Amino acid sequence: MATTAKRAFLDTFQNVVLRPRDLPYKVMFPGPTGTNAVEAALKLARKVKGRESVVSFTNAFHGMSLGSLAVTGNAFKRAGAGIPLVHGTPMPFDNYFDGTVEDFLWFERLLEDQGSGLNKPAAVIVETVQGEGGINVARAEWLRALQDLCHRQDMLLIVDDIQMGCGRTGGFFSFEEAGITPDIVTLSKSISGYGLPMSLCLFKPELDVWEPGEHNGTFRGNNPAFVTATAALNAYWADGQMEKQTITRGEQVERALLDIVDENDGAGASFRGRGLVWGLEFADKERATAICRRAFELGMLLETSGPQSEVVKLLPALTISPDELDEGLRILARSVRETA
Ligand SMILES: Cc1ncc(COP(=O)(O)O)c(C=O)c1O
């Protein structure tokens, strides 16, 4: 049973996801949580390059275990570690300086300047859209420049697609739009299609330097999740419909957010997003929490995101119908109005 379910998943993942995109990855099953996939990715990168440090970005979130926390930005979450979190080097994410500093100028200078004291990192880990960090969307050209920098400086590029992969931004992988091919990719969350614990670490075949059992775990490979993941891939990804639908629904969200911003002229409202992940922010940083509370009273669950919970985070189910989405967007507009 174990082998059959696992084989069926692997065949489907190859045929439906990897082969049509010409992605050469080997598929590894870490423990079933996202953070364990990140731990596997970090270990592998360090082992391949024989170096310790990994570069991460401001406001990044990669999980709550120690290795993942060391490349996570949030001070509150890091403090929970109770020990120094080392071997992570933070750099500014796209648009951190409001476009005033040329991309990667600082980063590359530090890497090349012997006096900077920065030992060459093994890898860079990045989210294409920072989900927990405030729905910060990296531009495609920034991601391409990051990949070029990694190639020039002999560092591996890890894309953590745990929240933005599996179609959240449109394409199955969030990095497809930028036309990059990361060396290592982590996936989790909706990969099982049914909310069952499952995560994957994908890597280029030449990086497979693992010894047998070197990243071991009792629950690696969760049988029910193999079954539901296979069914979900076949149901939603065997043709191009899911991607088109997500882009269309995203346009529906974008129109509604434009209206909300127009209606709230003077409140410093702004929004950003891709596919079916969007963030709405106001000059008053407390407003997001008030909006989510009002939406809850009106029967809709809405989260906040960002280091000060200052962003209203829209993350509807990818299978949502236009009418359901419209209803949710109307509740959002009403919650915004009633918290003015
Ligand atoms: C980008 C990213 N990486 C890693 C994780 C950690 O996943 P898990 O909570 O399954 O450990 C998350 C969870 O939200 C995430 O959004």
Image (cartoon, rainbow, N blue to C red):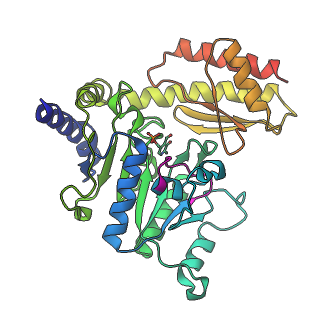
Quadrant containing the N terminus is top left
Figure check: 301 above or below 275: above
- Which residue is located at x 71 percent, y 30 percent? 258
The answer to which quarter of the image holds residue 31 is: top left
Q: Whole-percent x and y of residue 22? A: 26, 50
Q: Whole-percent x and y of residue 287? A: 79, 31
Asked if residue 164 lies left or right of residue 273, the reply is: left
Figure check: 144 above or below 59: below
Q: Is residue 197 magenta?
A: no
Asked if residue 141 lies left or right of residue 19, the reply is: right
The answer to which quarter of the image holds residue 180 is: bottom left
The magenta segment: 57-66
- Which residue is located at x 47 percent, y 58 percent? 125
Q: Is residue 61 magenta?
A: yes
The answer to which quarter of the image holds residue 156 is: bottom left
Count of numbered tags: 0
